[in-house]
Image (cartoon, helix red, strand yellow):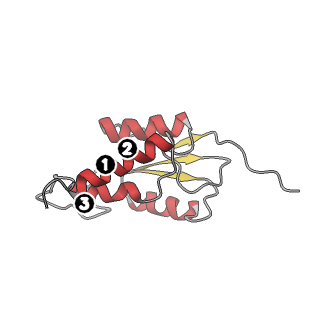
Amino acid sequence: MRGRPRPPQRILADLHHTRRLDPQPVLTGIEASTCAYWHHRPTHRTPLGSPDAPPLLLVVSARDPVTPIEGAHQLRHLLPGSRLITLDDDSSHGVFASRGNMCVDQTAAAYLVDGTVPTTDVHCAGPGLPAVS
């Protein structure tokens, strides 16, 4: 089928279209499909939690209703050298690149682009919780 875009091209086109509609969309999974076309194939897999595994950066909202922060703390302790970015006073699900929080976005971007792992867990000031009437 000539002229028809291949799956990686379709995914990128869809992501670009979404970004044109909303420069800061909340992406809840559509971006994950790009991983299927990533050309990196490791020759050796290090078990999760191994001291030889690279440190991971976990990002969480303090009051995420979908993935409670307790789970993030438990996972953080299972992964040697890993760090946790917490968006305090926030109750959203999906924090990086969707909440407009520079503290979260810059810390996560430094990890993704340069591999920079914070020396300690990071707490970022959130937007505040809704008032209860």
Instruction: Give the CA distance from mark 1 to mark 2.
Output: 6 Å
Relative depth, front residue between 108 and 92: 92
Amino acid tagged 2? His
Tell whether label 2 touches label 1 (CB within 8 Å). yes
**The quadrant where residue 66 appears:** bottom right
Closer to the eye: label 3 or 2:
2
Instruction: Give the CA distance from mark 3 to mark 2.
Output: 18 Å
Closer to the eye: label 3 or 1:
1
Q: Is residue 98 above or below residue 110?
A: below
Instruction: Give the CA distance from mark 3 to mark 1.
Output: 12 Å
User: Badge 2: how crowded within 10 Å, few (<14), some, or many (20+)?
Assistant: few
Q: Determine whether, in the image, residue 65 is placed left or right of residue 45.
A: right
User: Badge 1: how crowded within 10 Å, few (<14), some, or many (20+)?
Assistant: some
The x and y percentages for residue 89 are 68, 47
Location of mark 2 (residue): 16
Relative depth, front residue between 54 and 27: 27
Secondary structure, mark 2, is helix
Secondary structure, mark 3, is helix
State which quarter of the image contains the N terminus: bottom left
Amino acid tagged 1? Leu
Secondary structure, mark 1, is helix
**The quadrant where residue 63 appears:** bottom right
Please report whichever mark, 3 or 2, sits nearer to the chain's N-terminal start.
2
Location of mark 3 (residue): 36
Residue drawn at x 51%, y 42% is 22
Q: Determine whether, in the image, residue 127 is placed left or right of residue 12.
A: right
Location of mark 1 (residue): 12
Amino acid tagged 3? Ala
Q: Is residue 77 visible?
A: yes
